[in-house]
Image (tube, rainbow, N blue to C red):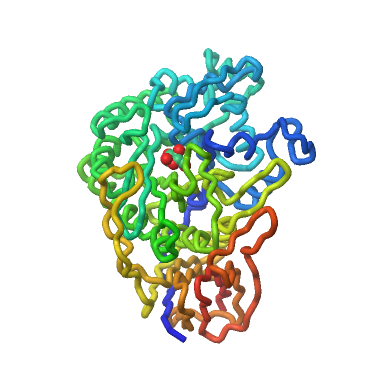
Amino acid sequence: MATATIRIDPARVIDKVDPRIYSGFTEHMGRCIYGGIYDPGNQNAELINEKTGLRKDVMDALKALKIPVVRYPGGNFVSTYRWQDGVGPRESRPRRPELAWLTEESNQFGTDEFIEFCRELGTEPFICLNMGTGTLEDALAWVEYCNSSANTYYANLRRKNGHEEPYGVKYWALGTNLALIQVDVAKSIAGNEVWGPWQVGQMESQDYAKKAFQWAKALRLLDPTIKLIACGETGFSDWDRVVLKKLAPVVDFHSIHLYTVSEGKHLVNVVGPAAAEKGIEITKSLIDLAKIECGLSKELTVCFDEWNVWDPVRAPGEKGAEEHYDLSDALAVASWLNVFVRKADIVKIACIAQSVNVISPIITSPTGLFLQTTYFPLQLFSNLMCGSSLNVHVGGSPTYSGETVPKFIHDLDVHAPESAKGTKLIDISAVLSEDGKEVRVAIVNRSDEEEFAVPILFGPETQVKDEVTVHEVWHEDLRAKNGFDGQNVKTVVRTEAWKGIYVLKKHSFQILVFTLA
Ligand code: AHR
């Protein structure tokens, strides 16, 4: 059996893991909202909350993910969205053409329903503003509707619609972006909702930055407590540099997006998140540069507000992007989450795209739901990988050396760095729990061929108890999926005697929980 060595020293803290890295995203796209979280017309009355129209089974599945923040209403959708259509009596809300996914929007679910969903879920709302067809006046009106306690038109409209108290929506994004990457290894075809050619309201970076700067100023006059998120790209783009330089003084977060694409190749799939890690590192430096150039000492961090495994050829957006994930995808998602934990010093929000049905860990039918393979790493991370992120080292792991395959989505000729070359097949992150009593180690063995006997060393000053709890997501078939007919891949928990070495099965994910002695 192959060997590799993991080294973790609980004294070497990177930063606190921000729980907001386990956030979600619900877009008016496919069956995410209608038939996903909201389904008042469903004949199976026991599934639906009679008062709110929300799906009870979906809410339970989401609650178990402990989602701190949910982004809404897009995504590409927001760039032609009139939020005013989605409030007030439902029978008089207009149906509109929807230009992102070429459907129709009924507007039966809007701002008030979204806030109700967030309250029931126990999560903070995060609203993305329309910088496509929308005006600053619309944006100000939306903030006033949600957050104002004044005796003014939109605040009063909220009251008239039955909501006396302001909603206190803290997070507002200045437009939205998109980036897709095929990491085979690394030609990224990256786009972005403000700069992408598929985008209603596409802009040049300078034009976006100037406009967003003016919007930020005005929005803060109306509500100085809000947190603003700028629309970045992937991190490895000049768009990010230009936008950061202009917007650093007026925003709180710089947003980047990435989807990893593998065309069914397992190793390409699981090393994909290395590109995100590179994008985060570059963004961190661009933030430093912008702060130096603007003479700022404020907090400015990364909001990775769309990420996931998504192949838009096998699951096109126009058809609802319903990916059916297998174990390989679950391992890729675990590797994505390892990146966010390792980058705890700079990534403070990350939103999996999306939360229900659309490239999602949860799939519904009118009569029930099933949890995809990717649900389980997400649930384990949000419940266990909290506290302080620890510096980690893996010695002796084989590395990825696959080929780079060109081309891809939207035929844009934008290159990502070849970040995945040299990526270790044993991928880990670790935390010291909030109470300081446990060290939890998330390990993906990305190899589909080798198992490893891995000594885990904690440094000379640290002793752990002689038992370890293992939360494992594994199946002998790398292509195993879950479905309405059965849950093949799920978390299995067991306690084992700890003798210093752990055996990693091939293509496995596990979180090991050690108690400090
Ligand atoms: O999450 C699906 C889509 O991905 C979003 O609408 C967009 O921002 C990106 O294209």
Residue visible at 42% across and 28% down? 79
Q: Nearer the viewer, residue 513 or 380?
A: 380
Give how far across and how far down residue 118 sits, in percent.
60, 38
Query: Measured from the top left, where is residue 508 in percent x and y?
Result: 53, 70
Q: Residue at x 79, y 36 (%)?
A: 45
Q: Residue at x 60, y 18 (%)?
A: 93
| Residue plotted at (63% across, 40% down) | 36
**Residue 437 in view in this figure:** no
Residue 242 appears left or right of 502: left
Number of numbered discs present? 0
The answer to whether residue 221 is above or below residue 465 is above
The C terminus, quarter of image: bottom right
Q: Nearer the viewer, residue 222 or 330?
A: 330
Residue 287, horizontal then vertical, whole percent: 28, 47
Decide: is 389 above or below 502. Answer: above
In the displayed structure image, the side of residue 32 where residue 303 appears, left or right: left
**Ligand 1 occupies quarter:** top left
Which one is in front, 203 or 311?
311
Residue that lies at the very extreme toward the left in this rendered image: 293
Q: Position of residue 289 (x, y in %)?
A: 23, 47
The reply to whether residue 235 is in sight is: yes
Camera-side residue: 445 or 285?
A: 445
